[in-house]
Image (cartoon, rainbow, N blue to C red):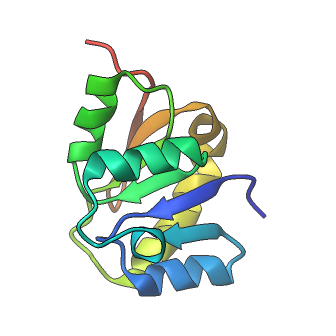
């Protein structure tokens, strides 16, 4: 299916992760590889070192990427009012299909129920 690999932050439902796995996604949850209390910078560094796209609802990752001037990893920042796991999984499938090339190159992708926009990495002022 996808050449991309994904790391789902703790705020992404295990149900969403399992649905995406069932669709052939190479995706793991932070809780499968790190302690629950792991700092954001440690999660970001793991995603960078292992070439994984980070999926999160935590807005701090964009600031961390900017501060560290990282070119990778790509981060998908979810800004949904609808937290239903099946909805999120379905939306992720649409978005990744649309932005797969950009995600491979390094972006921060901000996604809501009806739109998506991105910034290339590294983020500069």
Q: Residue at x 22, y 48 (%)?
A: 59
Q: Position of residue 117 (x, y in %)?
A: 39, 38
Q: Position of residue 15 (x, y in %)?
A: 44, 87
Left or right of 31? Residue 73 is right
Considering every residue shown, the one lying at the far right of the view is 1
Left or right of 117? Residue 46 is right
Assign the N terminus to one quadrant of the image: bottom right
In the image, residue 21 sits, relative to residue 5, either above or below, namely below
Q: Position of residue 93 (x, y in %)?
A: 58, 65
Q: Residue at x 61, y 31 (%)?
A: 105
In the image, residue 87 sits, relative to residue 33, either above or below, namely below
Residue 28, by quadrant, is bottom right
| Residue 73 visible here | yes
In the image, residue 120 sits, relative to residue 53, either above or below, namely above
Assign the C terminus to one quadrant of the image: top left
Q: Position of residue 19 (x, y in %)?
A: 56, 84
Q: Residue at x 63, y 57 (%)?
A: 5
Considering every residue shown, the one lying at the far top of the view is 125
- Which of the two residues, 50 or 122, is positioned nearer the viewer here? 50
Residue 2, by quadrant, is bottom right
- Which of the two residues, 73 or 35, is positioned nearer the viewer here? 35
Q: Residue at x 26, y 25 (%)?
A: 67
Residue 51, by quadrant, is top right
Considering every residue shown, the one lying at the far front of the view is 35
Left or right of 104? Residue 78 is left
In the image, residue 116 sits, relative to residue 1, either above or below, namely above
């Amino acid at each position: 299916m996808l050449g991309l690999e994904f790391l789902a932050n703790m705020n992404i439902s295990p149900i969403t992760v399992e649905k995406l796995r069932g669709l052939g996604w190479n995706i793991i949850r932070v809780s499968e590889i790190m302690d629950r209390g792991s700092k954001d910078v440690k999660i970001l560094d793991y995603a960078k070192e292992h070439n994984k796209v980070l999926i999160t609802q935590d807005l701090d990752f964009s600031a961390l990427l900017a501060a560290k001037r990282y070119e990778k990893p790509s981060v998908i920042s979810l800004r949904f009012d609808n937290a239903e796991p099946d909805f999120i999984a379905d939306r992720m499938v649409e978005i990744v299909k649309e932005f797969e090339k950009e995600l491979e190159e390094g972006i921060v992708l901000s996604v809501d129920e009806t739109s998506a926009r991105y910034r290339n990495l590294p983020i500069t002022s």
